[in-house]
Image: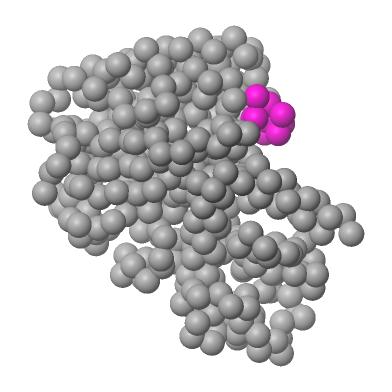
Amino acid sequence: TKVNAKPQFRLCKEDGKTGARTGCITTSRGVTAETPFGLVMTRKGLPGYLTMDNLKQINGVKGLHVCASHFFDRSGLGLRDGRPLSEVMGQEEDSPVLVFCGLRDPVRFNLNLYPAVGSGNISVETEAGVTTACQDSYMRFVKEAQPDFCLSLSDDIMNCNGKKRRAKAVKRTSEWLGESLNEFGGSGEELKSVGLIASILATERAEDNLRQAQAAAAASSDPSVVGYAIMGLGLGESEESRRGALLSICGQLSKDKVRYTSGPSTPIDLLRTIECGIDVVDTGFVNELTACGMAMVFPTDREGVPDPEVEDGFNLNLWSDEFIHDQRPLKENCECYTCRNGFSRGYIHHLLECRELLAEVLLEFHNTHHMCSFMKTIRTTIEEGVFSEYTEEFQKSYTINTTS
């Protein structure tokens, strides 16, 4: 049942010492999600090693990131057999999970290492090889897919690119936003329930960031725009540059719109990102840890301390021979499917050594649950006004444990 023409965002609480905040998203399907939260990365609409039924068993999953580039084949970009994306994913109409759609995979894409032919094209790496996409093909996919949110195209480039290439990337990103606004404005019923997220390409130049943020804030007067996406991060920039870009851009944006970004690669990065005022983040590093045979075990509760037996205090490398005879769960008192059902560290090590897919399935169950628990703690500390103290203690524990 449709309750709103577009998804809505409501700001609930702002942290008094940082830019962190909590809020609530309500989609056109009537589904609500508390922010901040992390998006689960998908491959053709599904988590890396889980099904949608598996995902229902994980408490706290609030959003999926679907990448249009995964649906490219030799005949072009699009959903096959006329099936909607929800059917391809196995998602029910009343599913409590939000769907964010972008063109590129924020974890694995070629970042224009293969220049696209034509100023309006963008290169993407697909299962059919490196190919080009454009605004029209992307919008056609969005109309077919009908996600809850759609990111406007952005020309993400590596931080090492020169001044002229960066200027071109900023210009192309702004032009694509304008084309998206025109598309949403003239699409009639086709994009009625999809919320447009206006992309802003973060750079190391404060003037560029300020100008883009002001333009995006002005564009937000359009009813199609329900939020902002700060793109181009996690691509080689320094921590100082990333934080400066997030703070300067978020400072210019309307508070009643949802804010998204990609780029965090550790729990510390995630905390610092939320500290700048971001509501929705990609958690691609969770997928990468799972694929590498690692389990997150850092403390998610406010009183927890890093396990001194864990080398970096945060992740277990289950490939290590030290776990051959270890019958303990991945994390004591963890309520995830893997730990609750007695799958031990030693057993998962054995599965990895035998190249059994069950190893990644069990690790993704655990890691996704662990990240959701972490995000819940973050929301709670913001609501209680102690987020700054929690972040400081968390970072201190991490620093002590990695240097001791």
Residue 248 on image: x %, y %: 58, 20
Q: Which residue is drawn at 46% across and 38% down?
A: 13
Q: Is residue 108 visible?
A: no
Q: Nearer the viewer, residue 186 or 62?
A: 62
Residue 339 seen anywhere in this rendered image of the structure: yes
Residue segment shown in magenta: 233-244
Q: Extreme right residue here?
A: 404
Residue 293 versus residue 4 in the image, above or below = below
- At 31% across and 70% down in the image, what residue appears? 53
The number of numbered badges drawn on the structure is 0
Quadrant (top left/top right/bottom left/bottom right) for the C terminus: bottom right
x then y, percent, for residue 353: 63, 80
Taking the magenta stretch, the answer to whether it contains residue 243 is: yes
Q: Would residue 61 appear left or right of 112 to someone viewing this image?
A: left
- Position of residue 251 in the picture relative to residue 346 (left or right): left
Identified at 65% across, 42% down, the residue is: 388
Query: Which residue shows up at 30% across the image and 16% down it?
Result: 221
Q: Any magenta on residue 361?
A: no
219 vs 16: above or below: above
* Position in image of residue 391 (x %, y %): 67, 47
